[in-house]
Amino acid sequence: MRVAIVGAGICGLYLTKILSQKGNEVFLFEKKEVLGEKACSALYSERIFDFFPFAKDFVENEIKFCKILFPKKEITLKFKRRFFVFDRKKIEEKLFEEILKEKNVKIFLKKEVKKKDLQEMEKDFERIIGTDGANSVVRKYLGRKNFPSFLGILAIFEERNFSNFVEVFPTKKGFLWKIPRGEKVEYGILEVGERAKKIFDDFLEKRGLKNFSQIKSAPILINNFWIPKNEKITLCGESAGMIKPWSGGGVIWGLSGAKILTECFPDFLLYKKRAEKFFKKQIFVSNFLKKSVYLFGFNFPFFLSNQYLIDGDFFSIREIVREFFSNKV
Ligand SMILES: Cc1cc2nc3c(=O)[nH]c(=O)nc-3n(C[C@H](O)[C@H](O)[C@H](O)COP(=O)(O)OP(=O)(O)OC[C@H]3O[C@@H](n4cnc5c(N)ncnc54)[C@H](O)[C@@H]3O)c2cc1C
């Protein structure tokens, strides 16, 4: 089949690789000239190795746990899976190298797909997949507005830090973070757009953190999960809102969605059904969990335990009940 993929982020690259290996003729369109530059902390669980075994060569540091620092309570979140901080650019470059070796792939860099292009593409291609991120043009073309109301900002400091935990400082709707990246340290924020920059600036100033070597930001499409009811055009990754509502992380979720898509391909309606079944439950449970922890953490911290053990990517109701309401670890 002739397939067009719009957006060469991590999900678009993965889909290009798998669908071309399955014998499809894949045309990949990317608006940028250079890949892997997106603002992203690249903190992923070991599930990333199921998709990209080579990612083990691009680990910057291992993270064993996360400290959530509410004003009057410190909670330690331990992970059932191993988590690592990666060099995302190198992962995407390596993936791109692999794709270049595939015979059935044609890549168009510096090609921004616009709404009018999509009209033409509908005639030229048998399937179109939008993996074009938070401000997806494919999503808009399908008549669904984007509401990337959250903004993620990160700043990198040239300071060696191999500690094995992430610090998280909850804010009203999101959180600030400190991630030890081995040779570097990253501070960042996820918050509602208009507030994010001000809170982040105040946070850095209070800590006397001035000389960052890099600062990047990008919108995040939280709580906007949607897959069109369309046999020919679909969405995957962040353009479909495959984003964890409690952390803004979207790489393992997006790749999990992409895996479902490759299994259902070319049946986009089956993909919609299976992805909805999986993600809607995850989104509901994650939102419930985040709201409960924030409510108790800010107002009734004594009800929370000091330590929880979680999966870090996916939740089950049973896990929540066991960990968050039994108060035992
Ligand atoms: C500050 C920050 C930190 C984050 N940290 C983490 C983290 O630690 N762990 C995690 O799992 N997630 C994290 N995320 C989220 C993660 O970056 C996204 O979930 C992930 O990048 C989504 O992948 P994607 O392939 O769906 O989209 P993207 O990575 O956004 O890729 C979309 C691609 O489409 C291209 N594109 C867009 N429009 C067009 C167009 N019209 N035509 C052609 N090409 C187009 C873009 O240039 C881009 O290359 C973070 C996000 C931010 C902002």
Image (cartoon, helix red, strand yellow):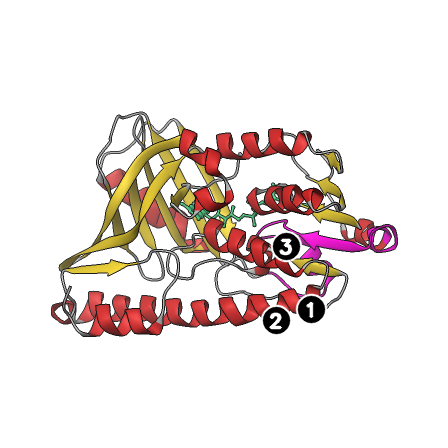
- State left or right for residue 218 relative to residue 153: right
Q: Secondary structure at mark 1?
A: helix
The residue mark sitting in front, 1 or 3, is 3
The answer to which of marks 1 and 3 sits earlier in the sequence is 3
Q: Amino acid at mark 3?
A: Thr
Q: Distance between the Cα atoms at labels 2 and 1?
A: 6 Å
Q: Amino acid at mark 1?
A: Leu
Q: Which residues are magenta?
A: 120-146
Name the residue that disc number 3 marks.
262
Q: Secondary structure at mark 2?
A: helix
Name the residue that disc number 2 marks.
273
Confirm or deny contact between disc 2 and disc 3 (CB under 8 A). Answer: no
Q: Where 94 falls versus 73 (above or below)?
A: above
Residue 321 pos. (x, y %): 26, 74
- State left or right for residue 76 relative to residue 8: left
Confirm or deny contact between disc 2 and disc 1 (CB under 8 A). Answer: yes
Residue 60 pos. (x, y %): 35, 31
